[in-house]
Image: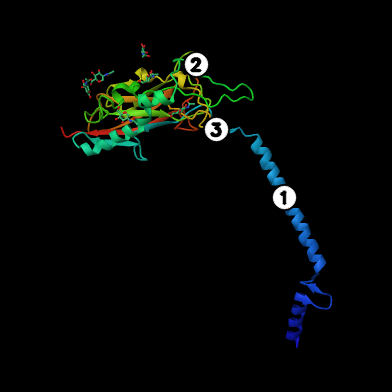
Amino acid sequence: MAKDGEKSDWKEFLWNPRTREFLGRTASSWGLIFLFYLIFYTCLAGMFALTMYVMLQTLDEHTPTWQDRLSTPGLVIRPRADDTFEIVYTIEDTESWDLYAQALDKFLQPYNDSLQAQKNHECAPDKYFIQEDSGEVKNNPKRSCQFNRTVLQNCSGIDDRYYGYREGQPCIIIKLNRVIGLLPGKDNQAPYVTCAAKKDDADKIGELIYFPPNGTINPMYFPYYGKKAQVNYSQPLVAVKFLNITHNEDVNIECKINAENIPVGGERDKFAGRVSFKLRINSKN
Ligand SMILES: *[C@@H]1O[C@H](CO)[C@@H](O)[C@H](O)[C@H]1NC(C)=O
Ligand SMILES: *[C@@H]1O[C@H](CO)[C@@H](O)[C@H](O)[C@H]1NC(C)=O
Ligand SMILES: *[C@@H]1O[C@H](CO)[C@@H](O)[C@H](O)[C@H]1NC(C)=O
Ligand SMILES: *[C@@H]1O[C@H](CO)[C@@H](O)[C@H](O)[C@H]1NC(C)=O
Ligand SMILES: *[C@@H]1O[C@H](CO)[C@@H](O)[C@H](O)[C@H]1NC(C)=O
Ligand SMILES: *[C@@H]1O[C@H](CO)[C@@H](O)[C@H](O)[C@H]1NC(C)=O
């Protein structure tokens, strides 16, 4: 009996023919609820769209509104070693270094003089290549300066297509990551890259030679205005050639950029402005 009562209560709750209520509410009550939520969500969506629109209006498509740490660019090396940053090979084993030479060939293709002459501008050296917008009028697209492969001389892969790997005098190429607006160097002191052995390996690194001379990065490659504004930008490079590195031993090396006004990573970011890698050249002789 009690069970039947419950059942009919439940049935009545679902649909009460007497009061014409569905789930305890009349049709008009339900209608009002739906109407309320419809208006509520429409307003919410409208507000979201409006905020989005306003935000997008304030964005400049050519420069990021927020950029972390303007000051110190990261450095990377080529040939790209695996994630461990090791370049290890055996002089007599051609296959062990051929991949490195091929990687450099590929990396340097876009720097071929002829391609640079097509794409880029012959800039006045030793000063920044400033191309500011004048107020609302965008000075786009912006030109970029030529960085000719031949500037890397003995590390350009032109005269020596094995980049010194075959002789045990390998070239490593250092690339500065792009940082929009960076103006490294001060008072006509161009930034330059230096490499040195880590503490215990100081007597193993031997003599180095840099291309361009002294590892200098010409100021004309700065500032960088961003991918959209400066489509043909070629990042400047520095090559370092190890002329007399000790064979059959690990040599830990660190390269860094030197410029008066850019701090090299301290505790906060150990990798800012520097790159470390291991070089090991094995020789059976
Ligand atoms: C770049 O130059 C090298 C050597 O001069 C040549 O072998 C290569 O085909 C060139 N690549 C392009 C894309 O022009
Ligand atoms: C780069 O090479 C091209 C072609 O040889 C040459 O015309 C141009 O002057 C060179 N640019 C620089 C900056 O040396
Ligand atoms: C970029 O390079 C292309 C050729 O690859 C050239 O036609 C174009 O004018 C260059 N753009 C700028 C802004 O220098
Ligand atoms: C480049 O290599 C050639 C041939 O090995 C050598 O004679 C010359 O001194 C090297 N240039 C530099 C700047 O070391
Ligand atoms: C390289 O540095 C030395 C010593 O600091 C300097 O005498 C020389 O002029 C520099 N060479 C170039 C091409 O900047
Ligand atoms: C190369 O380095 C060795 C020591 O590792 C040294 O004895 C030798 O004189 C160096 N050679 C040159 C040409 O500097």
Disc 3 marks a residue whose amino acid type is Asp
Disc 2 marks a residue whose amino acid type is Lys
Say left or right for 255 vs 31.
left
Q: Secondary structure at mark 1?
A: helix
Pointer 2 local density, CA inside 10 Å: few below 14, some 14–19, many at least 20: few
Q: CA distance from mark 2 to mark 3?
A: 22 Å
Disc 1 marks a residue whose amino acid type is Leu
- Mark 1–mark 3 CB contact (< 8 Å): no
Toward which corner of the image does residue 100 lie, by quadrant?
top left
Q: Quadrant of the N terminus?
A: bottom right
Q: Quadrant of the C terminus?
A: top left
Residue denoted by label 1 = 44
Q: Say which of 187 and 139 sits in front.
A: 139
Residue denoted by label 3 = 68
Q: Say which of 135 and 94 sits in front.
A: 135
Q: Nearer the viewer, mark 2 or mark 1?
A: 1
Q: Give coordinates of residue 42: x percent, y percent.
A: 73, 52
Residue denoted by label 2 = 186
Q: Give coordinates of residue 275: x percent, y percent.
A: 40, 31
Q: How is the image coloured?
A: rainbow
